[in-house]
Amino acid sequence: MNKTLPAILIVSVLGLPILGGAAPPSPARPAGAVVLKIASIAPSRSPWGNALEKLANDWERISKGSVEVRIYPGGIAGSEQDMIRKMRLGILQGGVFSNMGLAKIDHDIVVLSTPFLFHSRDEFNAVFEKMRPMFEKGLEAGGFKIMLWTLAGWVNVFSKTPVREPDDLKRLKIAMTSDFPEIEQVWKKMGFEVSPTNNDMMIQLQSGAVTAIYLPPLLAGSGQYFPLVPNMLSPALAPLVGGLLLSDKAWALLPAELHQPFLDATVEAAKGLYEETVNLEADALKMMKENALLVHEITPAAMVKWRETAEKAVSALIGALFSKEVYDQVVADIQDYRKTHGQ
């Protein structure tokens, strides 16, 4: 399927191959201009790549040339962890990050990646809106200004043999990115066998070293993994969340009168990103189903087993992965949402 990946969130969370190294040398800085170097793992012609280019043009227009924005797409500035380090050193001024990168700044953000915690997109959106100030406070304490939050889809399990209940998956070995050890801990505590992987997921699948993968449908399709794991567990397990950050030093360099116009332009540039991802994901699922992918629905009783398995694991990891205060608040907000909506 010749589809461009829709967002850095999807690429980076799952540890797909990226290019390393420092940002390339830049042309001479215009006299008096503030230069903002913003990195992304998203390819230059992907939806996120296009949004960043639009953002760069808008910020330069709004600032009347007093701010110059340079975009470094496609992972040329390194991994998310590399990007965070370079922002702290002042080599970069901004970057787009996934759950994984954001969680390295504020560990409490790991709670958003908890499997089976959220039941729907609407539920997640409602709860996240309440929790957003707390997460933003944590990122700001780490030295970063959040310019934009975005939801870029959900993650599913794909497997060699059908999976409907937890015991089915316990017979298999799941490939997960080694760059997000916190989620690896959750799945291990749930009782599953996990194999950390970097760029060798296809090799592991072909050799039989792993027999299941934890990916969004879009990547299972575009990466051509699904022929080796042609069964998908229907429920979406966790949201892919990310955002555009500037370092607090870069934010402070910008004239105060540009702050709100820049924030407004960021929201405008990102309009339609999630919807575009949803459409691409639907195309990927359609293509995979036409090529023998089997999607397995589960019974309400099986769903209870999955949620109980996840809850026990998370309860044992509170404090190690994220604070009890944040977890309890997320759960309380979820319960309030369900009561309000009769769930």
Image (cartoon, rainbow, N blue to C red):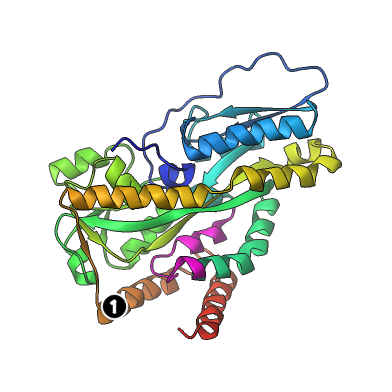
The picture places residue 333, in percent across and down from the top left corner, at 57, 76
- At label 1, which amino acid type do we have? Lys
The picture places residue 244, in percent across and down from the top left corner, at 60, 44
How many marks the image carries: the answer is 1
Residue 82: tell me if it is visible: no
The picture places residue 228, in percent across and down from the top left corner, at 16, 47
Q: Does residue 110 appear to the left or right of 305 in the view shown? A: right
Which of 337/205 is in front? Answer: 337
Which of 6/12 is in front? Answer: 6
Residue 165: tell me if it is visible: yes
**Residue 60, quarter of picture:** top right
Q: Check if residue 121 falls in the magenta segment.
A: yes
The residue under the point 66% across, 57% down is 136
What's the magenta region?
A: 106-122
Q: Quadrant of the N terminus?
A: top left
Callout 1: 10 Å neighbours few (<14), some, many (20+)? some
Q: Is residue 211 above or below residue 198?
A: below
Q: Does residue 145 appear to the left or right of 294 in the view shown? A: right
Please give the residue where the numbered disc 1 appears in the rendered image: 305
Q: Check if residue 340 falls in the magenta segment.
A: no
Q: Is residue 72 above or below residue 310?
A: above
Q: Is residue 189 above or below residue 43?
A: below
The picture places residue 92, in percent across and down from the top left corner, at 63, 31
